[in-house]
Amino acid sequence: MDDLPRVGAEPHHFLVQAPVPVLDVDGFTVTILGLAAFAVASVLAAVFYPALEQHGNGWWLGVCVSGFGLGLIGLAYCLYRRSRRRAGRWDRD
């Protein structure tokens, strides 16, 4: 019972965040992995498109190509952000 905080006492900090460094500050690695996954999925969906269309899943190809396109936009943003951070012109962490 002595470990519980009392009413009116100073707050106890039970949760302490460890000083862990950020692994990927600009998100470049995650974007590349997602872009590669959507590229592979697009190729596979294109190869198996007749079977997908036969089962009513032809829209999967559009989803894969859209994901790849959005990944390219994300990659461009990550490269822009990386160059700004390296130049010291980025206001946020």
Image (tube, rainbow, N blue to C red):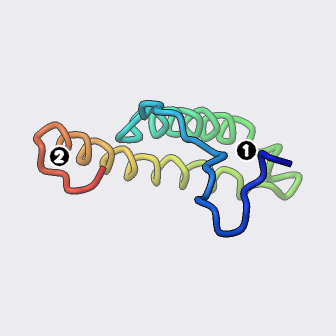
Q: Secondary structure at mark 1?
A: helix
Name the residue rendered at 78%, 52% in the picture: 4
**Looking at the image, is mark 1 or mark 2 nearer the viewer?**
2
Residue 76 percent across, percent down from the top left: 30, 47
Name the residue rendered at 61%, 49% in the picture: 13
Label placed on residue 25: none
Considering every residue shown, the one lying at the far bottom of the view is 8
Residue 78 percent across, percent down from the top left: 33, 45
Q: Secondary structure at mark 2?
A: helix
Q: Earlier in the sequence, mark 1 or mark 2?
A: 1
Q: Residues within 10 Å of mark 1 (few under 14, many from 20)?
A: some
CB atoms at circles 1 and 2 under 8 Å apart?
Answer: no
Residue 48 horizontal side relative to residue 40, left or right: right
Q: Residues within 10 Å of mark 2 (few under 14, many from 20)?
A: few
Residue 32 percent across, percent down from the top left: 45, 34
Please tell me which residue lies in front, 28 or 51.
Answer: 28
Q: What is the distance, in whole Å, between disc 1 and disc 2 at their CAs?
A: 41 Å
Residue 47 horizontal side relative to residue 16, left or right: right
Label 2 belongs to which residue?
84
Q: Amino acid at mark 2?
A: Arg
Please tell me which residue lies in front, 48 or 60.
Answer: 60
| Relative height, residue 74 to residue 37 (above, below) | below
Name the residue rendered at 25%, 40% in the picture: 82
Residue 68 percent across, percent down from the top left: 50, 46
| Relative height, residue 25 to residue 58 (above, below) | above
Label 1 belongs to which residue?
49
Q: Amino acid at mark 1?
A: Tyr
Please tell me which residue lies in front, 12 or 18.
Answer: 12
Residue 87 horizontal side relative to residue 45, left or right: left
Name the residue rendered at 16%, 37% in the picture: 86
